[in-house]
Each structure stands twice: as structure tokens, then as C-alpha cells.
């Protein structure tokens, strides 16, 4: 019984070490071109920020007070590849400014 327990603990430890080694690789910090913000207004939460065009066609982050009024706009459901909301970036409030958080 002791030998079985020792083998199980050794297998668990080996699995943990191998998982840690496999999970730790270099992080690619090149996220490509990050769209520059168009507004210098202070934001307090992500909902204070939007793209500079309706229907996910915005290409730069801006404050909602400086952004377009999309209340009566009908969207076609298509999004450009370089659009913020439909593309690789999200508009967020970071350090009290509207910015784009992008992924590869």
C-alpha cells in the first residue's frame, strides 16, 4: 500500500512539473497596430467608451460623449476586419482614458 501511494505522489509531482514547464513559454508582446484614442475625456467605466462609428465599424476608441449617436441606426450585421468591436480589439476604460485592448 505504501509503494502505491508513493508512486501516485511521484506521478502527481511529475505531472505538475511537466505541466508547469509546458505552460511557461515566451509571451509574444507584439499585438500589431493598436488604434489611438480620439478623445481625452475622462472615463470611469468601460461603458463610457465606444468606437468612432456605429455597427462595429469604428476604427478608433473614443468617449461616448464624442462618439456617434447610434440610436436610430440599422446595422447590416457585417463587420469590417479592422473594426474595433467586430475585429480584434475591444474598447475599454484604462487609466481613466478610452483605449483599445487588442489581441492577435
Image (tube, grey):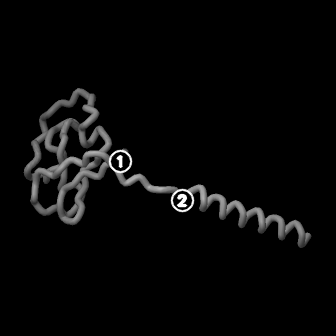
Q: Is residue 4 above or below residue 30?
A: below
Dot 1: few (<14), some (14–19), or many (≥20) neighbours within 10 Å? Answer: few
Of all residues, the one furthest to the right in this rendering is 1
Residue at point 33% right, 49% down?
A: 31
- Quick one: SS at disc 2? loop
x then y, percent, for residue 8: 80, 65
Residue at point 32% right, 42% down?
A: 88
Q: Which residue is mark 1?
A: 103
Dot 2: few (<14), some (14–19), or many (≥20) neighbours within 10 Å? Answer: few
Q: Earlier in the sequence, mark 1 or mark 2?
A: 2
Quadrant placement of the C terminus = top left
Q: Is residue 19 left or right of 38 when viewed as pictured?
A: right
Quadrant placement of the N terminus = bottom right
Q: Is residue 55 above or below residue 93?
A: above
Residue 46, quarter of picture? bottom left
- Quick one: SS at disc 1? loop
x then y, percent, for residue 9: 77, 68
Residue at point 24% right, 61% down?
A: 94
x then y, percent, for residue 48: 18, 56
Front residue (pair 62, 25): 25
Residue 78, quarter of picture? top left
Front residue (pair 37, 96): 37
Q: Is residue 90 left or right of 40 when viewed as pictured?
A: right
Residue 68, quarter of picture? top left
Tag count: 2
Mark toward the viewer: 1 or 2 = 2
Q: Is residue 56 left or right of 11 when viewed as pictured?
A: left
Q: Which residue is mark 2?
A: 24
**CA distance separating discs 1 and 2:** 19 Å
Amino acid at each position: 500500500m505504501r509503494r502505491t501511494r508513493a508512486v501516485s505522489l511521484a506521478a502527481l509531482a511529475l505531472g505538475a512539473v511537466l505541466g508547469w514547464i509546458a505552460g511557461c513559454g515566451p509571451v509574444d508582446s507584439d499585438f500589431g497596430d493598436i488604434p489611438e484614442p480620439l478623445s481625452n475625456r475622462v472615463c470611469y467605466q468601460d461603458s463610457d467608451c465606444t468606437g468612432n462609428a456605429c455597427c462595429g465599424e469604428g476604427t478608433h476608441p473614443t468617449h461616448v460623449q464624442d462618439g456617434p449617436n447610434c440610436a436610430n441606426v440599422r446595422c447590416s450585421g457585417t463587420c469590417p476586419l479592422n473594426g474595433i468591436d467586430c475585429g480584434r480589439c475591444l474598447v475599454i476604460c484604462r487609466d481613466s482614458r478610452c483605449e483599445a485592448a487588442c489581441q492577435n
